[in-house]
Every structure is written in C-alpha cells, then in structure tokens.
Image (spheres, rainbow, N blue to C red):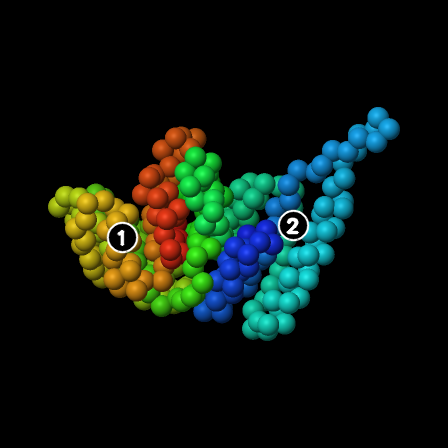
Amino acid sequence: MKTILVGVDFTKSSENTINYAIKLAKQSGSKILLFHALTAPVIHTTSGLVFMDNNKAKNDAEKEMKTLLAGLSKKNSSVKFDMEITYEGIKERVKKLAKNKKINLVVLGLETKTKIESFINKTTSLDLTGRIDCPVITVSEKYKNHSLKKMIIAIDNKENLKAGLSKRIHAIIDLLKMEAEFVHVITEDELNIRQTHNRQINVTNIKSADFKTGLSSYAKKTKADLIMLISNNYGAFYSLFVDSHSKKMILTSNIPVISVHK
C-alpha cells in the first residue's frame, strides 16, 4: 500500500491539508501518515539548574495527535491512518523516509498570510521541492473545494522527456487516477518531445508573456485541479538557484501544485 505523508501543525490550514490528503488517499487507495515535527525543547532555569522540558511537549503533541487520529478514523473508516511525532526537522526526517521508500507522496499546507513573507523566508514546501525522492503537493489555505479530476503537467521542451522522468510522471498519474494534460508555455519554438515507454505524449502549447501567467490562466480555463511542475535538483547550490517558476507557482496558485524532481 502506498503512503501519503501529511504535515500536521494543528492549525486551520493544516486541517484543510489533511482533508485534501484524505481525498487523495481514498482515490489512490493509499494510507496516511500524520506527521508533526516538534520545535526544540524549551530551556528552563530553576534555582540555578538548567533542564530540557521535552517530555511534556511531546506528550501534549501525542495526546492532540491521537485525538485527531481517532476523529479522522471514525469519519473515514476506509482510510488507514498512522502518526509520527519527532524532534528531527521535517526536511531531514522526510528525506530519510523518502530515501527508504517509506513514503510515496508528501502533502503540505501553505497559509495565505505567510505568502509574502515566504518570498524571503522559504516555506517548508519550497525547502523540500527538488530535494527529496518523492513528489510534494502544496495545498493553499484558500483551496477548499477539493477535486481530483484533471491535472496539467508543465513540460520544459528544451530537452527530451527522458525515460526515468516519464516513468515517474506516469506513475503519479496512475496513482492519483486523474486525467492528465501535458502543457508547454511557449517562449520560443523549442518543442522536442519524444514518445517514451510506448505512451504517446501530446503537448498543448500556450503562448504567454510569462510562465506563471500562462499556466495559471490555462489551469483556470480548463478547470484543472492540480498543476505538476518538474523541479531541478541543484544539490548544494539549490538554495541559490531554486527556480523562480516553481517558487512563484507554489506561492501564488489557488489550486494545489505537485513538484516532481528530474
């Protein structure tokens, strides 16, 4: 059974993200791992003594998570839930889980009020995009009318759709059971897509002044429910070159964005 990790921080945005992940799980036949990363323990000073009060924070989080899990299980009997609470940073822990094939998809929320600030300070979604070996879906707090019918896939036609990437893309399409359309926002005539894995790939070309405007407009026009972006893995230089296309779409899109690394 496939596993969807969903980030939980007990906020309204998190609740919306969980509901979206549940819809994904039901459509794909996956189970859900509710994941909560604790902040560093608070240091207290009493009579000159210093100690780490980490047990209380973890116990409180476990209690809240178990209550949440029980309620979700009762309302969604067809979905299997599990939970994980850790002091390890979400990026480090998720990277390990993905590397060990313990998760197949990550779903994270994005609070509307943090979008402007996030252009300077990375969101968790941006920090994970292109860095872990599984797709990451970012769900805007505004996106309430959850639907999983159509996905548009943004293709960079400057290079061939290589076999490995094609295989990963189609695995996601098969998992989510959504209608998929490959789209290229034209800046110049550079179409160079070839058939891979005996699947005929038809690409819709869109002319627009810029990538974000073209893709967003087409998504609205075609009533798409999900936008897929292909992210480069820049390794040590990723923080310097995190591509503006992915960043702008993740931070401004009113529908979920799924990022897949090359």
* In this picture, residue 181 sits left or right of residue 148: left
Instruction: Note whether 77 is above or below 261 in the view shown.
Output: below
The correct choice, above or below, for 147 with respect to 128 in the image is below
The quadrant in which the C terminus is found is top left
- Identify the residue at horizontal 14%, vertical 43% (top origin): 188
Q: Position of residue 79 (x, y in %)?
A: 56, 69
133 in relation to 20, above or below: above
Mark 1 vs 2, N-terminal side: 2
Total numbered badges shown on the rendered structure: 2
Q: Are marks 1 and 2 in contact (CB under 8 Å)?
A: no
Residue ID at (43%, 44%): 115
State the residue lying farthest toward the right. Answer: 47
One can see residue 73 in this view:
yes
Please state the horizontal and vertical placement of residue 192, each as a whole percent of the image. Answer: 18, 48
Position in image of residue 162 (x %, y %): 28, 48
Q: Amino acid at mark 2?
A: Ile
Image quadrant in which you'd find residue 87: top right
Residue drawn 47% across the image and 36% down it: 121
Query: Closer to us: mark 1 or mark 2?
Result: 1
Q: Residue 241: x, y in percent?
A: 36, 33
Q: What SS does tag 1 mark?
A: helix
Q: Which residue is mark 1?
A: 215
The residue at the point 48 percent across, 62 percent down is 20
Q: Secondary structure at mark 2?
A: strand
Q: Is residue 199 visible?
A: no
Q: Nearer the viewer, residue 70 or 82?
A: 70
Where on the picture, by quarter, is residue 88?
top right
Q: Nearer the viewer, residue 167 or 234?
A: 234
The residue to which callout 2 is attached is: 85
Q: CA distance from mark 1 to mark 2?
A: 37 Å
* Amino acid tagged 1: Leu
Left or right: where 112 falls relative to 50:
left
